[in-house]
């Protein structure tokens, strides 16, 4: 059973997006500002479309928080769609507004338009595209920000950076080839946050931006790749005992649920299939100085959570921090591939679903490239998944209770 549950609701041009997050313990300090920071990061990025100039996302907390702290009941969030004022009749719930705007009848290749219309018996595909739009991910980012705030109480930090947009890649070395501790990952993350495309490599960023400019002039779109890391996790989140408890499967499902994500790798990922076992397995070492010492939970930097703090550690992290469906104490490293956005200014061939005659696909205002934003959305989905696994392992009704359970487990690991 899922410990942390969440739902989102709302359409792209509807009045608002709503989200409910159930399972956050009481006593967590939380404000709208904590959430809005990530909402702002999602809206940024070179190659975004005109919608980002209209919206300035802000999360309103409707329930679950009193006087700055969670109270244990479901947290409800609301994000208003500022563009809704231009769609009052077109997205009205009232029957008398039907037909006020033209129906969308020319499905876009690569989008949910046609399969959604067939599944739900719609002959106006706006009923599909409004919900399948990536606009819905704004609420996921908001809910994920709450999960991040919870995990930060335990010095668990989540970040992301872009490694490729189209044919333009980053020269930043793979994290599996580094010491792979929190300090190194934070260095890469901080460099990426200064880049318009969230790439840690300055020259790579320039190449990506030039490619986006050229693609925009051609009326085309771009995909790419990004990496997500999680530092500070102890060994033992997830389980090997059932398929649906394996943390790698849960993370892959969470990431591929993001619109346009077509592939996920963990650690070296597909590259492992090209190498010998002796080249990719992370040898196990032990630091006797780290065992038997009570670990205090502090607000210090993530560097305090290097793998050597737990006694058992690895010099490499080809497994990406996950073995046998469980975290192993090393940073979790995930890589995701985003396909090019299917809405093109120069439309592809399609079919009019009413006349069944050839037509150009419909065009909706969209981005040229949203890979930098996808990384932020990926962080949110990973945060929600990891917070759920964390609460499953160390569950309690209050933050203080979860901390007691967590500290007890860390003491156990040190004496193992």
Image (cartoon, rainbow, N blue to C red):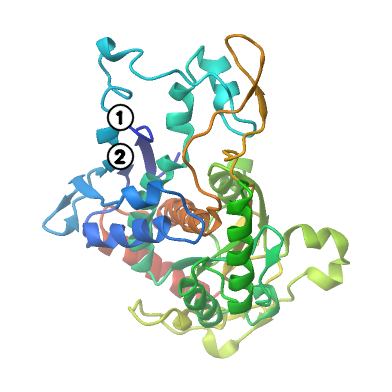
CA–CA distance in space, label 1 to label 2 = 7 Å
> Image check: 36 left or right of 163?
left
Rate crowding at label 1 as few (under 14), some (14 to 19) or many (20 or more) other CA atoms within 10 Å: some
Residue 163: tell me if it is visible: no
Quadrant location, the C terminus = bottom right
Residues tagged 1 and 2 counted as in contact (Cβ below 8 A): yes
Residue 344: tell me if it is visible: yes
Q: Image point 36% across, 67% down: which residue? A: 152
Q: Judge by depth and name the residue closer to the eye, 6 or 16.
A: 16
Question: Percent position (x, y) of residue 236?
Answer: 55, 61
Q: Image point 79% across, 62% down: which residue? A: 271
Question: Which disc is residue 83 wearing?
Answer: 2
> Image check: 380 left or right of 253?
left
Q: Judge by depth and name the residue closer to the eye, 253 or 13.
A: 13
Rate crowding at label 2 as few (under 14), some (14 to 19) or many (20 or more) other CA atoms within 10 Å: some
Residue at the far left: name it: 67
Question: Percent position (x, y) of residue 98?
Answer: 33, 12
Q: Is residue 392 above or below residue 103?
A: below
SS at circle 2: helix
Quadrant location, the N terminus = top left
Question: Which disc is residue 313 wearing?
Answer: none
| Quarter occupied by residue 273 | bottom right
> Image check: 52 left or right of 279?
left
Question: Which disc is residue 87 wearing?
Answer: 1
Question: Percent position (x, y) of residue 189?
Answer: 50, 74
Question: Percent position (x, y) of residue 287?
Answer: 60, 86
Q: Judge by depth and name the residue closer to the eye, 158 or 188.
A: 188
Residue at the far front: name it: 217
């Amino acid at each position: 059973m899922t410990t942390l549950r969440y739902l989102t609701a709302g359409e792209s041009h509807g009045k608002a997006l709503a989200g409910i997050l159930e399972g956050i313990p009481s006593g967590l300090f939380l404000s709208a500002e904590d959430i809005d920071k990530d909402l702002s990061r999602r809206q940024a990025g070179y190659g975004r479309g005109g919608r980002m100039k209209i919206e300035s996302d802000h999360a309103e907390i409707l329930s679950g928080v009193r006087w700055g702290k969670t109270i244990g009941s479901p947290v409800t969030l609301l994000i208003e769609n500022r563009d809704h004022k231009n769609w009052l009749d077109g997205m009205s719930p009232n029957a008398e507004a039907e037909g006020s705007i033209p129906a969308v009848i020319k499905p876009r290749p690569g989008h949910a338009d046609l399969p959604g219309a067939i599944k739900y018996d719609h002959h106006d595909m706006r009923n599909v595209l409004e919900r399948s739009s990536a606009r819905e991910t704004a609420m996921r980012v908001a809910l994920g920000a709450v999960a991040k705030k919870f995990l930060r109480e335990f010095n668990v930090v989540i970040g992301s950076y872009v490694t490729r947009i189209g044919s333009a890649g980053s020269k930043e070395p793979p994290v599996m080839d580094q010491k792979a501790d929190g300090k190194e990952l934070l260095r890469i993350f901080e460099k990426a946050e200064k880049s318009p495309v969230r790439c840690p490599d300055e020259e790579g960023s320039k190449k990506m931006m030039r490619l986006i400019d050229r693609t925009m002039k051609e009326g085309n779109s771009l995909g790419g790749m990004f990496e997500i890391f999680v530092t500070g996790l102890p060994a033992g989140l997830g389980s090997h005992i059932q398929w649906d408890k394996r943390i790698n499967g849960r993370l892959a499902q969470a990431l591929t649920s993001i619109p346009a994500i077509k592939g996920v790798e963990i650690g070296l990922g597909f590259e492992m299939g090209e190498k010998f076992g002796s080249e990719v397995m992370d040898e196990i070492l032990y630091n006797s100085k780290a065992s038997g010492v009570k670990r205090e939970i502090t607000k210090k930097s993530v560097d305090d959570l290097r793998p050597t703090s737990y006694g058992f550690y690895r010099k490499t992290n080809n497994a990406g921090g996950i073995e046998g469906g469980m975290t192993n104490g090393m940073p979790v490293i995930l890589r995701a591939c985003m396909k090019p956005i299917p809405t093109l200014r120069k439309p592809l061939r399609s079919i009019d679903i009413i006349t069944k005659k050839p037509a150009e696909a419909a065009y909706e205002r969209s981005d040229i490239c949203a890979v930098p934003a996808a990384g932020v959305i990926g962080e949110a989905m990973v945060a929600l998944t990891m917070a759920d696994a964390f609460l499953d392992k160390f569950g309690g009704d209050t933050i203080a209770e979860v901390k007691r359970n967590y500290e007890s487990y860390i003491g156990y690991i040190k004496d193992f």
